Each structure stands twice: as structure tokens, then as C-alpha cells.
């Protein structure tokens, strides 16, 4: 009892002491984030110029970042901000820059090329975007040329849409107890395959909505030991396209960390589905899908919104098959740009190097989210 | 706990011991139909109290021994205990209240609410028959089931309800539509709707036409193997393979057909599928 009191008093004293030290002698980053100064170094080298730019983007000090550009006459500050965060609401609209990396590509006496890798903290995890920044000497300091990418503007227009949607009327309080409710959609797991990975056991597979109504789906898997004892139950979380239209197929991936395949005697799969109101639009074309071999194995392609509705966030799921048609991996990527009608947006899905050699074919699906929800 | 509860419980226990030796103090019917009036004739002299103890309720009536106690009705079917209490004796007897003979309501459970066409014994219906007072009618009752589709076809079954319930199984027909599934006892009918929906696409076929620098891919009207139009919204996947790359579009059926626009790639192979059903392939040489 006395020891506990002593420990509590010690911790309280240490906390007060550290707060006092931090207040009297704050670190430079703390001063900068408190608005009392900045983190910027002198831009006496190309690396410092780009690092300053990274700090300004992280601090959302758009004015200072814009003022530092050598090519600022080519675009406005607003265009610069929209180039980073998008013209329409998207994954990056409400994010902040978590960290950045600067890597020199080449340099001469008067100019240099550097890679600026931006790690954005988004609601679905880290999103990385990379820009090659050209830096030029201006007297005794260096100034970056911002590689502005002006998004193709969609001209104002009216796009007629032949809307198709489903609404659901569930049983109400006026129905007698024998009145049946509308059944949940019938879904079926058409493929499932366990894999042993360094991080644990992974279940990959595909789920089909074999009904004529839209389904909100998820899949749970339970690993059962050889002595018939459940080891763990996990769900697919966001490694699945949750909204399935009739006859649509989604891949899924379920991760069981810290489990080895040798521990597993059997697997119990539980697909779940619920009837939801949904819309059949928008239609997204996945164009120019290409498998790139290791190293840097990836599936790349472009998303083209064939509808009139702007898609704010797109989630691409790739299913990778071996020569026999068996699923060997499922991977995904959130696209950090809004999809405007008929405007291609690239995507790139990383494939683990050790699995890339087994991949023979692939299939992709896109889940879309539009502000305002399903309409 | 209310004092009356103890009283009733005590009376019930006492009655069980007194048994039938004293039941001649009362003359009561052995069976009463729910909702019908009845009377209990007492014998002897003096004042007494008559208790009727049944499922979920207790009735009490003061009477002069030798008089007849009249009750307008009992509604809950079940086994009842009548206890007659006077200062000098306690007598008891029992009787049953049975459901009214005439069915008044049906509880009809039909499953599923939606199923593909052409399945054997896939639609099930179960009926529970009740009288006007919600008592389950356990006497054998004839129940007629009828499944009728919009085109006029019907399937009929006649089943005798046992212990208050009857069930049947029906086939889904070859025609899609909202079928009416009805259960009927006398002139009481309960109806449910069972949606019969198309099966998998059959003979999925697409056509390709160049439109400017693009290809317009359009399916023929998509139908199942029974000729039913596949529901709008069903996803059809168009795939174009060319030079180690591919493009895909998941397009929903609208007005029975699916269409998509894709880039022209000479030498490309175009294919179409829906769910696990493959359609035709077209090589685009131009």
C-alpha cells in the first residue's frame, strides 16, 4: 500500500517536472506546431529546399509553400492546394501529412531532381503519393519547381442516367406474426484457400451474390484445431467489396496473425448477407490492367467512371489466380482521387514478391463511395 | 404477494385432497366450448363461494347452496378447477374448456419469400388454426393450400391439420413472378406473396460494334434457361484481353440488356460473363 502511494507520488512529480521543462525549454518542432516559430531550415541545398516544402505541406502552410516555388507563376495557390488534396472531396480531403521522405535523384551545380514521397494519414490507413521535384538554384538558395498536375476539368453538363435502384420494405408492426419478412440475399462462397504467410494464416477466396437483389456482405472465418477446438475467428473487414449487386463476385481476405497452418485441422466459413437499398450506378471501367512481374510486382490500371455521378472514394480489389485458376492472393488499394466522369485515374496494387511468380491471371472489382451515400 | 394468490393456491391444494368424494355437492359440465355460457348447480344449504381456477385467470362467485351459478363464458381453452367453499365443507371438481369449433383466424408461415424458378418442393407453408378467442383448434381440420402464379397456373394441396397445425411443400414454377400462396380453412383465408425469380443466365451472348474510336458491347436480352428475363441490376462482366493486358467493366442489366464502352485494341479478345456463367467470346481483328 505504502509502495503504491510512493510510486503514484513519484509519477505525479515526474509529470510536473517534465511539463515544466517542456514549457520553459520547448523543442523546435513543438514551437513550430504551437505557432510560435517554424521548423524551416535555410534552403542552402536542394535537399533542404524540398524538406522545407515537406514541412510546410505537413503544417498546411500553403501560402509559405506556394511562395517558395520557383515556378509559382504557372499556377495559383488554390491550384497547388487542389493538386495535393483534390478538387472534389476524396480520400485526401480530410487528411494530414503524416511524414515525408526526400531522396535525391540527380544534381548539378544549378539544378537538381529529388523524389518527395508523401505519407498521408487517411481514415483507411496510410496513402503514399510520390512527386519528382525539380529544384533550381536562385542566388544563395534553392527553390523547388512544383510538378503541378492539373486535373482535367469536366465541362458543366447534364448527364441523363437511367437509374436503377432497389428499395426494401421490411415487415412492420401492423403485420401478424406469421407474415414472413423479406429473405436475406443468397450468397455463396465459390472459392476459398488457406495460405501460410510470415504474419500468420491467410484465407483468400471469392463470394458470389447468387440472388436477384443487392446484398451487403461480409465473411467470417474460424480456424479449428485438430482437436476440434476453435483457435480464432476473424472477419474480412475491408478486404472485401461489401456491396454486391446480383451475380457480382467479390474477393475476400481474412488474416489470422500468429497462427501457423500446421495448427489448423479445419476451417469454418460464415458468409453473412443483408438486404440493403442500393443503386446499380456508377459503372466503373477498369482499363489497361497489367500484371508487372517482380521486383516491384504490381497490378496497374486505370479507373474510368462511365456514369455521371462523381465517385469520391474508389476501392480496387484485385484477385490473383495461378495457372489452375485457384486464388493465390487478394490485394487492394484505395484510390486517393475522386473519379470524375470519363476521366481516367491510375491505380497500382502491390503483389507480394514471393507470390508474384505464381500469378497467372487476375480479376479486379471496384467498390465506390459517393458523398451523400447510396442514391 | 397478494393475499388472494395464497387463498387460491390454498384452495387448489385443499381441493386436490378433498378429491371427488365431495364432488356431488356440484353438478358441472365436463366440457365447455370457449365463448359459450354454462352453469354449475350446487346442492345443500347455506352460503358458499365458488372459485373457478383456469389458465391465466380465476373467477369467484358467492352463491346460496342449492342455487345455480351461471357464467356467461370462458374464453381461454384449458383445464379448469371448480372449488366450492362453505363453512362446513369444501368440494371440488374439474372441467375442460375446449376451443370453439369454428376457425376464425389462421397463422400462416410461408418460406421462402423469394426463390428461383423450377425447384421441387422448395416452397413450404405451415398453418396454425385458431378460434375467435385465439385458442389453437386441435381437432382435425381440413386446410386447403393454393399457390397461384400471375399467368393463372395453380398448385393445390389439401391437408388435415393435426394438433392445430398443417403444412405442405410446393414446387416453384417455371415462370417468374409474384405468386400468391394462400391457406384456407372454411371461409378463412390467409395469403402470402412468394417471389419466383429467374435462375442463372442461359446462352449469354454479346455483340460488338465500333463507335468512333471505341467499341460498344451490348448483350442480347439476357434470359434464364426457362426463358425468363433476368432481373435488371444483375451484373454482367465484359472483359477485353489484349497484348498481356485487360480491361473489364461490371455493367448492370438495364431493361434486360447490359452495355459498356471499351477502347479498341486490334487483336483483342472480348468475352462476357455473369456470376459463374460464361457467355460468348469475340476476337476483334480490326
Image (cartoon, rainbow, N blue to C red):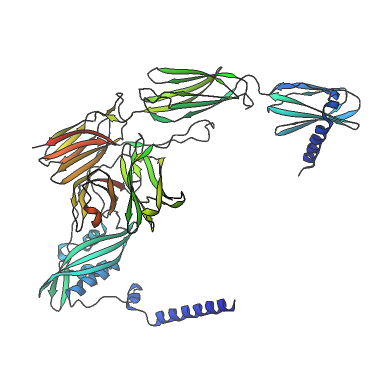
Q: Residue at x 19, y 69 (%)?
A: A103
> Could you tell me residue A217's position as x and y percent?
38, 43
How many marks on residues?
A: 0
What is the quadrant of the C terminus of chain A in the image? top left
Q: Measuring from the top left, give residue A164's x and y in whole percent.
A: 31, 36
Q: Residue at x 18, y 34 (%)?
A: B281
The answer to whether one can see residue A375 in this image is no
Residue found at the far left of this picture: B286
The reply to whether residue B89 is in sight is: yes
Which quadrant holds residue B230?
top left
Pinpoint residue A48: horizontal percent, then vertical percent. Answer: 21, 74
Residue drawn 60% across and 19% down? Answer: B140
Q: Is residue A167 left or right of residue B215?
A: right
Q: Is residue A193 left or right of residue B104?
A: left
Compared to residue B183, the image places residue A204 above or below, namely below
Q: Quadrant of the N terminus of chain A?
A: bottom right
Question: Which residue is at the front of the view, A201 or A56?
Answer: A201
Instruction: Give whichever of B152, A159 is nearer the camera.
Output: B152
Q: Quadrant of residue B52?
A: top right
Q: Position of residue B121 (x, y in %)?
A: 43, 25
Amino acid at each position: 500500500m505504502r509502495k503504491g502511494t510512493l510510486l503514484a507520488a513519484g509519477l505525479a512529480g515526474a509529470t510536473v517536472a517534465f511539463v515544466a521543462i517542456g514549457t520553459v525549454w520547448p523543442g523546435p518542432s513543438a514551437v513550430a506546431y504551437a505557432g510560435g516559430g517554424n521548423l524551416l531550415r535555410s534552403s542552402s541545398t536542394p535537399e533542404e529546399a524540398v524538406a522545407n516544402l515537406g514541412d510546410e505541406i505537413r503544417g498546411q502552410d500553403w501560402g509559405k509553400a506556394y511562395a517558395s516555388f520557383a515556378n509559382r507563376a504557372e499556377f495559383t495557390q488554390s491550384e497547388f492546394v487542389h493538386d495535393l488534396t483534390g478538387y472534389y472531396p476524396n480520400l485526401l480531403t480530410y487528411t494530414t501529412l503524416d511524414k515525408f521522405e526526400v531522396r535525391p535523384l540527380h544534381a548539378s551545380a544549378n539544378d537538381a531532381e529529388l523524389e518527395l514521397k508523401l505519407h498521408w494519414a487517411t481514415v483507411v490507413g496510410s496513402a503514399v503519393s510520390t512527386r519528382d521535384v525539380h529544384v533550381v538554384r536562385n542566388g544563395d538558395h534553392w527553390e523547388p519547381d512544383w510538378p503541378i498536375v492539373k486535373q482535367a476539368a469536366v465541362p458543366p453538363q447534364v448527364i441523363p442516367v437511367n437509374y436503377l435502384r432497389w428499395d426494401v420494405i421490411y415487415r412492420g408492426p401492423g403485420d401478424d406474426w406469421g407474415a414472413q419478412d423479406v429473405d436475406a440475399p443468397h450468397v455463396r462462397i465459390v472459392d476459398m484457400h488457406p495460405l501460410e504467410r510470415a504474419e500468420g494464416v491467410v484465407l483468400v477466396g471469392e463470394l458470389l451474390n447468387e440472388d436477384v437483389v443487392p446484398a451487403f456482405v461480409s465473411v467470417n472465418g474460424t480456424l479449428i484445431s485438430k482437436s476440434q477446438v476453435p483457435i480464432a475467428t476473424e472477419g474480412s473487414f475491408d478486404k472485401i467489396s461489401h456491396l454486391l449487386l446480383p451475380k457480382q463476385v467479390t474477393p475476400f481476405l481474412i488474416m489470422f496473425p500468429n497462427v501457423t497452418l500446421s495448427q489448423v485441422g479445419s476451417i469454418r466459413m460464415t458468409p453473412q448477407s443483408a438486404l440493403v437499398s442500393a443503386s446499380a450506378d456508377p459503372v466503373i471501367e477498369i482499363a489497361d490492367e497489367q500484371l508487372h512481374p517482380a521486383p516491384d510486382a504490381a497490378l496497374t490500371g486505370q479507373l474510368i467512371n462511365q456514369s455521371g455521378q462523381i465517385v469520391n472514394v474508389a476501392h480496387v480489389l484485385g484477385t490473383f489466380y495461378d495457372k489452375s485458376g485457384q486464388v493465390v492472393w487478394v490485394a487492394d488499394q484505395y484510390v486517393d482521387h475522386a473519379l470524375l466522369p470519363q476521366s481516367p485515374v491510375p491505380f497500382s496494387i502491390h503483389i507480394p514478391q514471393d507470390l508474384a511468380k505464381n500469378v497467372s491471371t487476375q480479376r479486379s472489382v471496384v467498390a465506390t463511395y459517393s458523398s451523400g451515400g447510396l442514391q | 404477494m397478494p393475499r388472494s394468490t395464497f387463498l387460491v393456491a390454498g384452495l387448489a391444494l385443499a381441493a386436490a385432497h378433498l378429491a371427488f368424494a365431495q364432488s356431488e355437492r356440484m353438478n358441472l359440465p365436463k366440457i365447455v366450448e370457449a365463448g359459450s355460457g354454462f352453469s354449475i348447480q350446487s346442492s345443500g344449504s347455506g352460503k358458499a363461494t365458488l372459485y373457478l381456477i383456469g389458465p391465466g385467470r380465476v373467477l369467484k362467485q358467492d352463491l346460496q347452496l342449492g342455487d345455480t351459478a351461471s357464467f356467461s363464458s370462458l374464453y381461454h381453452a384449458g383445464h379448469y378447477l371448480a372449488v366450492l367453499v362453505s363453512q362446513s365443507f369444501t368440494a371440488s371438481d374439474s372441467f375442460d374448456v375446449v376451443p370453439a369449433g369454428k376457425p376464425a383466424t389462421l397463422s400462416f408461415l410461408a418460406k421462402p419469400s423469394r426463390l428461383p424458378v423450377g425447384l421441387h418442393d422448395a416452397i413450404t407453408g405451415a398453418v396454425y388454426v385458431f378460434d375467435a378467442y385465439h385458442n389453437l383448434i386441435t381437432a382435425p381440420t381440413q386446410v386447403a393450400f393454393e399457390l397461384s402464379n400471375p399467368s393463372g397456373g395453380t398448385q393445390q394441396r389439401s391437408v388435415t391439420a393435426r394438433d392445430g397445425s398443417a403444412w405442405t411443400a410446393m414446387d416453384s414454377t417455371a415462370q417468374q413472378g409474384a405468386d400468391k400462396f394462400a391457406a384456407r380453412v372454411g371461409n378463412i383465408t390467409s395469403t402470402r406473396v412468394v417471389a419466383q425469380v429467374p435462375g442463372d443466365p442461359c446462352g449469354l451472348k454479346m455483340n460488338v460494334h465500333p463507335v468512333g474510336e471505341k467499341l460498344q458491347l451490348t448483350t442480347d436480352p439476357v434470359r434464364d434457361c426457362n426463358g425468363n428475363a433476368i432481373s435488371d441490376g444483375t451484373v454482367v462482366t465484359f472483359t477485353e484481353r489484349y497484348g498481356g493486358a485487360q480491361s473489364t467493366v461490371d455493367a448492370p442489366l438495364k431493361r434486360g440488356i447490359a452495355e459498356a464502352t471499351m477502347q479498341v485494341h486490334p487483336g483483342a479478345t472480348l468475352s462476357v460473363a455473369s456470376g459463374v456463367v460464361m457467355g460468348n467470346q469475340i476476337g476483334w481483328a480490326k
